[in-house]
Amino acid sequence: MKTVRVALVGDYDPAVTAHRAIPEALRLSGQRLGVAVDPTWTHTATLGPGVPQLADFAGIWCVPASPYANTDGALAAIRFARENGRPYLGTCGGFQHALLEYARNALGRAEAEHAETSPDAAMPLVSRLSCSLVEKRGRVNFVEGSRLRAIYGADHAEEGYHCNYGLNPDYESIFRDATLKVAARDKAGEVRAMELSGHPFFFVTLFQAERAALRGVEHPLVTAFVEAAGL
């Protein structure tokens, strides 16, 4: 049986629900695809410039539970995946930091910051949500023509969250002509997922798709990630 190695970039904490769910989500998807998934927790404190230790992984998942011990390390991992065509999935904190990485390094907005760690930033690209999504579920509507919609095979889904921060609506316009595009919104129209065009697999979601595994359910987005990493 083929083995697919996946780096889980984040600071493992067994008390975090998503951290318990992710290995099981990968196992269920691997089972569906007939591959063995080997997930390796990669603490952000171990990541330096160029992240050479990620070179041998087939896929990179930047996991929830930020702020990370080493924000620069997490951003370096995301940049490595984006620039090298390495399959990437970012959920919750992985969504937030992918926006920061792209804004800074692809759009030249070096001032882009996360309001949780830089509350007085001139450009709080990631800001506190108007309503907390900690332990909430809600409908997400997939943008017509998006790859995410094709992966789900549906125009909407119900997903679970555990977050207080997301894309600041005041700065959504900087992505209007970018390759990182909106792929899903909530019922109020706020961004809940984005995807990178021209990349083999680069999807980021504010919701935590991995939570389906705690109900014994294989998730289509996780399966698509494993499939891309196994190619």
Image: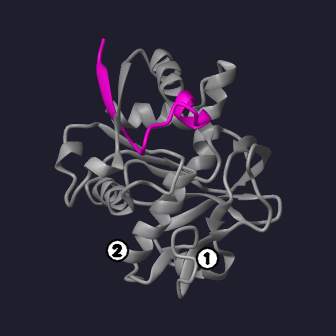
Q: Is residue 73 left or right of residue 187?
A: left
Magenta stretch? Answer: 1-21
Tag 1 or tag 2, which sits nearer the N-term? 2
Q: Which residue appears at 55% of the width and 28% of the height?
A: 20
Tell me the residue that label 2 is attached to: 105
Q: Which residue appears at 61% of the width and 38% of the height?
A: 209
Q: Amino acid at mark 1?
A: Glu
- The quadrant holding residue 110 is bottom left
**Inter-mark Cα distance, 2 to 1:** 16 Å
Look at the picture and state if 155 lies above or below 35: below
Tell me the residue that label 1 is attached to: 172
- For the question of whether residue 176 can be seen, the reply is no
Q: Is residue 21 left or right of residue 202?
A: right
Q: Are marks 2 and 1 in contact (CB under 8 Å)?
A: no
- The quadrant holding residue 152 is top right
In the rendered picture of this protein, how many numbered marks are placed on residues?
2
Residue with the most extreme bottom position: 122
Look at the picture and state if 123 lies above or below 223: below
Look at the picture and state if 86 lies above or below 72: above
Q: Position of residue 96 (x, y in %)?
A: 53, 61
Q: Nearer the viewer, residue 14 or 182?
A: 14
Q: Amino acid at mark 2?
A: Asn
Q: Position of residue 214 (x, y in %)?
A: 65, 24
